[in-house]
Image: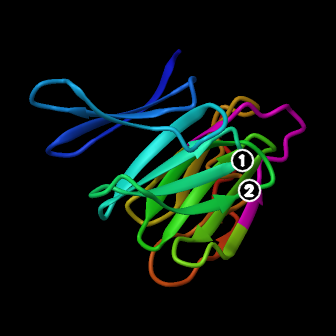
Amino acid sequence: GYVYGLATNDDVLISSSEDRTIKVWCRQTWACLRTLTDHTSYVYQIDLHDGKLFSASFDRTIKIWDTTTWACVRTLDYESEVYSVLVRGDKVVAGCTNGTIVVKKIDTGETLSCSSHDDGAPQRGFSLLTLDDGRLISASSGTTLEHVGHSVVSLMGSSVSEGPVPGGSER
């Protein structure tokens, strides 16, 4: 199947794919070291952060894997398929196919914020990016770029806040 996501560190390359698997590859030999099979649908994006791998899937979950044992240590549940994942500090951001961007605490799974791409167009997924000042930029199939005209989630510090972006949306 198609490979949808890639992540790397000094030792391994990790791929996520349409066949519901995550593969861990040795960067020295390119041999497949392990295949993770806990997801029940496509695995889209992945992110490595502080010894953990975060995987976003159409099974409506983000799974958190310990990169020393490759065991799944936590599953975060969502109301819609999860297309993208971004980790910053103690927070995980999910871009979901229902048009929402959900911020949760990693250790508790508590939802801190839920924003929406509300332009009436069907959503097919998101790309997520944080700027140096902590503002979140998201892109989806419904809008070219949300800067984020409706709201911005601040991922810096210990609090999460939402508010309008000066200058509105860019398209």
**Residue at the outermost bottom position:** 158
Assess disc 2: are there few (<14), some (14-19) or many (≥20) residues with their C-alpha within 10 Å of its C-alpha.
some
Which amino acid does the dot numbered 1 rest on?
Arg
Q: Does residue 162 appear anywhere in the picture? A: yes
Q: Position of residue 85 (x, y in %)?
A: 54, 49
Q: Quadrant of residue 50?
A: bottom left
Provide the residue designation for mark 2: 78
Secondary structure, mark 1, is loop
Quadrant where the C terminus lies? top right
Secondary structure, mark 2, is loop
Residue closest to the eye, 30 or 56: 30
Left or right of residue 33: residue 79: right
Asked if 18 appears above or below 75 in the picture, the reply is above
Q: Which stretch is magenta?
A: 114-127
Mark closer to the chain start, 1 or 2: 1
Q: Residue at x 62, y 69 (%)?
A: 104
Secondary structure mostly seen in magenta is loop
Which amino acid does the dot numbered 2 rest on?
Tyr
Q: Which mark is residue 60?
A: 1
Q: Is residue 140 magenta?
A: no
Q: Which mark is residue 107?
A: none
Residue closest to the eye, 112 or 134: 112
Q: Position of residue 134 (x, y in %)?
A: 46, 65
Q: Are marks 1 and 2 in contact (CB under 8 Å)?
A: yes
Question: How is colour applied across the structure in the image?
Answer: rainbow
Q: Residue at x 45, y 81 (%)?
A: 157
